[in-house]
Image (spheres, rainbow, N blue to C red):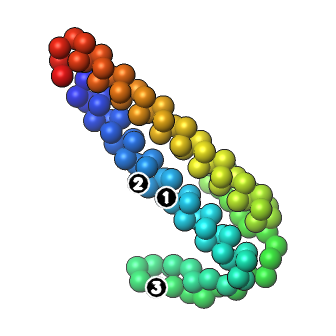
């Protein structure tokens, strides 16, 4: 049980501290870029390049190193869908964790 609980905790932490914040930051940056038309883009540790965006298309990953081209609003919708899916997965993991702990307590293992 300890290994399963540890694996669930790692997945919960990854989703809540890495995946969801990255999606939110990407959405915010993309929205700001499309509104302002410029941004600083990180290219390495402490190094940024100015970027001017004049509208048009953006590329987004659909998995397996495959990218699609779409307008910014479509990409923002895809990112929102990914964020909602991550939140649902997070809820499911938390529920599985609570169930595991509850079962352990009822067996006197916790």
**Furthest-bottom residue in view?**
50
Question: Residue 56, position in %: x, y?
Answer: 82, 73
**Residue at (35, 27) in percent of width and height:** 98
Tell which of 65 and 61 is nearer to you: 61
- The disc at residue 2 is none
Task: Say which element carries label 2.
Answer: helix
The numbered disc on residue 17 is 2
From where the camera sits, is residue 109 visible? Answer: yes
Question: Residue 70 appears at what percent x and percent y?
Answer: 79, 61
Q: Residue at x 22, y 11 (%)?
A: 107
Describe residue 14's horizontal placement relative to residue 36 as left or right. left
Left or right: residue 81 versus residue 48 is right
Dot 1 corresponds to which residue? 21
Near-viewer residue (2 or 94): 94
Of tags 2 and 3, which is closer to the observer? 2
Q: Nearer the viewer, mark 1 or mark 3?
A: 1
As displayed, is residue 5 above or below residue 54? above
Rendered image quadrant of residue 18: bottom left
Q: Earlier in the sequence, mark 1 or mark 3?
A: 1
Q: Position of residue 36 (x, y in %)?
A: 70, 82
Q: Residue at x 51, y 85 (%)?
A: 48
Identify the residue at horizontal 57%, vertical 83% (top origin).
40
Tell me the SS state at disc 1.
helix
Pointer 1 and pointer 2: residues touching (CB < 8 Å)? yes
Mark 3 — residue? Answer: 47
């Amino acid at each position: 049980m300890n290994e399963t609980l540890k694996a669930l905790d790692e997945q919960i932490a990854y989703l809540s501290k890495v995946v969801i914040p990255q999606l939110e930051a990407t959405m915010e940056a993309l929205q700001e870029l499309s509104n302002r038309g410029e941004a600083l883009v990180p290219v390495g540790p402490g190094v940024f390049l100015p970027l001017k965006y004049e509208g048009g298309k953006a590329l987004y990953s659909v998995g397996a190193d495959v990218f699609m081209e779409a307008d910014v609003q479509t990409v923002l919708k895809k990112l929102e869908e990914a964020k909602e899916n991550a939140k649902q997965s997070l809820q499911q993991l938390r529920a599985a964790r609570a169930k595991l702990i509850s079962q352990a307590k009822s067996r006197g293992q916790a």
